[in-house]
Image: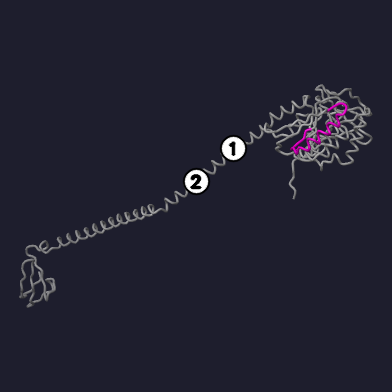
């Protein structure tokens, strides 16, 4: 049975899917519901005969608009799909807007884009993956432009271990498309990890070399992963669609290509802390094991056993001594009792003047059991007298 998820989780998943799938969309439509917000953002919708989609152009991109939007105007939008999680709505986030029916360059751009797309040059399935830790990067750009300096600065701050090689290239004007093609082929022959092809911003005419079919095919045929970094964030060129990765600017290309040393330093710090904590836990656990073994050993050691036996012996000795003393005291008391009884029953103590013991035939009898003419023995502790009964009278 599937586990239920929250609405927020579902909206987040939809947002992630939309923003990673519809990264570079190109949409044509008619403007409606137009609002210029005081923040500088522009909110509107575009529609055709059957559908409507909400759009937004944020101030950062809106400031580059060369014309004012009006309700009913037909336009062409470059942007990406995003979702607003609290309401569960999706919208088209615009990076560039052109009026529909623009001149020959725009038409040529669309025709070439459609042609190459049908041939499969834009397919995501053929995009090459960038290496996580590149060692060598070839830069196909102008040696005198600001782009090269920006990329070098970002590379030094982000990953100083990288080795950069510049392939000086003409990036605008007559013959620039052939020079770009030759530089791409030269860079590809070096077997470097990544190639960055690009230049700084400019007009559509300045950037047009990167919209040429020969440049697109050179990028497509290269074996080395290529990042297209042409112009500013709002600029979309044919090279962006053919390249393995599109960067908003040359500086952004270097950020995409290189890992961040600060993140890795923090990661190493976290690893060190985690290692130390685990090491301390291991030591503590081993220490507890040793202590338990020590206690067990002490409890079962010969000394412990001898000590236990000695205590039992001492207890037995003490118990024996106490028992013997009790027995001796008891026997002594018995002897004393017998002695006292003997002394108290000694004939010398019992015989008084005028009293003797009468016996006949060696048996003690009372005076009432004697008869006339019988021979009896009168006995004291000191004398024994034989007598004959002459007369008996009752008193």
Question: Helix or strand or loop: what does disc 2 sit on?
Answer: helix
Image position, residue 108 (x, y; %) = 92, 32
Image position, residue 87 (x, y; %) = 80, 34
Q: Residues within 10 Å of mark 2 (few under 14, many from 20)?
A: few
Q: Quadrant of residue 209?
A: top right
Foreground residue, 14 or 217? 217
Disc number for residue 272: 1
Is residue 181 on the magenta stretch? yes
Do tag 1 and tag 2 residues touch (Cβ < 8 Å)?
Answer: no
Q: Quadrant of residue 62?
A: top right
Q: CA distance from mark 1 to mark 2?
A: 24 Å
195 horizontally vs 321: left or right? right
**Residue 343 in view of the camera:** yes
Q: Which residues are drawn in magenta? A: 171-196
Q: Assign the C terminus to one quadrant of the image.
A: bottom left
Image position, residue 40 (x, y; %) = 82, 23
Pointer 2 residue = 288
């Amino acid at each position: 049975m599937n586990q239920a998820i929250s609405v927020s989780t579902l909206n987040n998943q939809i947002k992630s899917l939309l923003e990673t799938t519809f990264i570079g969309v190109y949409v044509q439509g008619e403007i409606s519901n137009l609002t210029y917000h005081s923040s500088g953002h522009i909110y509107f919708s575009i529609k055709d005969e059957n559908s409507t989609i909400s759009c937004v152009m944020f101030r950062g991109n809106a400031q580059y608009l060369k014309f004012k939007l009006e309700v009913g105007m037909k336009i062409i939008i470059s942007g990406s799909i995003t979702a607003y999680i609290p309401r569960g709505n999706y919208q088209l986030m615009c990076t560039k807007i052109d009026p529909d029916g623009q001149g020959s360059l725009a038409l040529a751009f669309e025709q070439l884009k459609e042609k190459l797309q049908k041939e499969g040059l834009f397919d995501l399935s053929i995009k090459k993956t960038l290496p996580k830790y590149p060692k060598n990067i070839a830069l196909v750009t102008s040696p005198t432009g600001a782009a090269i300096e920006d990329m070098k600065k970002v590379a030094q701050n982000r990953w100083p271990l990288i080795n950069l090689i510049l392939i000086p290239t003409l990036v605008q004007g007559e013959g620039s498309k052939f020079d770009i093609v030759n530089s791409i082929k030269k860079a590809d022959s070096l077997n470097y990890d990544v190639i960055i092809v690009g230049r700084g911003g400019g007009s559509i005419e300045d950037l047009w070399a990167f919209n040429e079919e020969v440049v697109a095919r050179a990028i497509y045929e290269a074996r080395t992963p290529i990042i297209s970094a042409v112009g500013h964030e709002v600029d979309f060129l044919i090279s962006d669609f053919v390249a393995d990765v599109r960067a908003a600017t040359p500086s952004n290309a270097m950020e995409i290509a290189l890992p961040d040393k600060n993140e890795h330093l923090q990661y190493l710090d976290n690893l060190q802390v985690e290692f130390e904590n685990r090491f301390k836990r291991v030591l503590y656990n081993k220490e507890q094991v040793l202590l338990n073994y020590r206690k067990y050993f002490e409890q079962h050691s010969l000394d412990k056993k001898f000590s236990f036996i000695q205590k039992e012996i001492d207890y037995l000795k003490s118990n024996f001594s106490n028992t013997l003393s009790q027995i001796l005291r008891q026997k002594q008391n018995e002897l004393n009792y017998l002695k006292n009884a003997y002394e108290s029953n000694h004939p010398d103590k019992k015989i008084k003047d005028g009293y003797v013991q009468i016996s006949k035939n060696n048996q003690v009898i009372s005076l009432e059991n004697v008869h006339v003419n019988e021979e009896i023995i009168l006995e004291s502790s000191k004398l024994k007298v034989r007598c004959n009964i002459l007369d008996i009278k009752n008193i």
